[in-house]
Image (cartoon, helix red, strand yellow):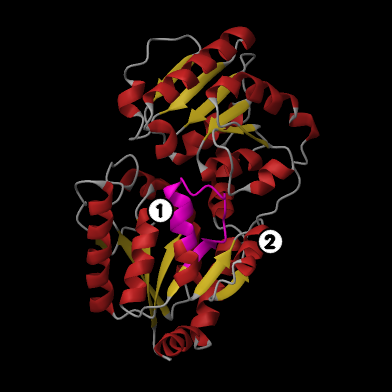
Amino acid sequence: MSKRRLCYVIGTRPEVIRSAAIFRAFDSGYPQVVVDLLNSGQHFDPSMMSQLSEEVGLRTPTRTLPTPLGRQSKRFAAMVMNMVDVLEEGRYDAVVVYGDTDSSLAGALAGVKTRTPVVHIEAGCRSGDMRMQEEINRRLIDHVSALDLAVSENCLANLRAEAVPGHLVMTGDPQYDVFWEHRPAVTGPTGPIPRGFVTMHRAENVDDTSFLWKVFAALESFGERTSTVFTWASHPRTSAFLCTLPLSPWVQILQPLPYRETLQHLAQASVCLTDSGGLQKEAFWLRTPCVTMRSSTEWVETVAVGANVLCPAPEDLDEALASAISARRRVRWTVDPYGGAGSSQRAAAVIVEWLDGDGGAGWRRSISQ
């Protein structure tokens, strides 16, 4: 049997974390499949990419594209053009993208334009907020993909409701497998001082410094009232702002954290404040109440069970933090809507089965008719 060749695109910290177990599944179970790892260059800070890759055990990229410069639109256009060159040179059976980043959309569009079937892992997520670039990205990727792998029944229902034309399969969430590998090294609260953990990076939030100042003020107020000390982990989008904050006994600033340290801080927190998608699920898995600084979330399952409180306005943050903490005992923490362990193996198996079943060739024939 001739070998199958996949081009797997990464470009950001979340893709590094979530993809590690998938690569191990391919490497251990499918020697007939060659998977080239393509780094788009979207995140180029070593703390966001190379160091993290080593920590979670993701292999060195087969190829890394030049770091795109200029405005966001120019950077995106450069990624698409560079990926077109890679796909045309490689003659791949499929290009695999994960999630909702610009790197994933660039890989999907490059795949369509080079007639390379697109496989989308984490398909079907919807927040309904079209102000978010991520929401636009994930919708576009789903509708041009030949194979959409959903991580929950809700995501699968979204795909069906939109009449997405690709082949749809619910595989569960590969992020859980990476989380579970690191979970044994993570301990819970160790002292009497209540802790909080904060991460923020969404452009619609952090590009507005007045918004961030209000968040900081709300955290200080809540910390002083409840003796809670918040740890705020920096992100390239927030690092300039965080450097301007005054010293505070209630809000401590950290540099970008390794993955295991992120989980450690999250496990020891009595509450988490974030606008990140992945952290909402990790907080749920660690049984840490979460406040999401958005008006909606793609991870509706965490809100439905009471583990996640939405709070788009900093003025309401004090009440939201208190509500999340008080609801902790009522949350159905044992409910896991994301497939549990083995999702990475299921995703790899579905991709290989789809390829062996003429899925990619069938897609090419369908678009040529």
Q: Is residue 314 magenta?
A: no
- Image-quadrant location for residue 241: top left
How many numbered discs sit on the rendered protein?
2
Residue drawn at 37 percent across, 15 percent down = 245
Q: Are marks 2 and 1 in contact (CB under 8 Å)?
A: no
Three-letter amino acid code of the residue under disc 1: Thr
What is the CA distance from the residue labelled 2 to the residue labelled 1? 22 Å
Which of the marked residues, 2 or 1, is nearer the chain's N terminus?
Answer: 1
Give 98 or 205, whichever is nearer the viewer.
Answer: 205
List the residue tagged with mark 1: 101
Q: Position of residue 337 (x, y in %)?
A: 70, 53
Residue drawn at 64 percent across, 64 percent down = 156
Q: For the N terminus, which image quadrant? A: bottom left
Three-letter amino acid code of the residue under disc 2: Glu
Q: Secondary structure at mark 1?
A: loop
Q: Position of residue 234 (x, y in %)?
A: 39, 29
Check residue 67 in the rendering and tell me which mark sits there, or answer none: none
Give 333 or 207, whichever is nearer the viewer.
Answer: 207
List the residue tagged with mark 2: 153
State the extent of the magenta-drawn residues as a range: 120-139
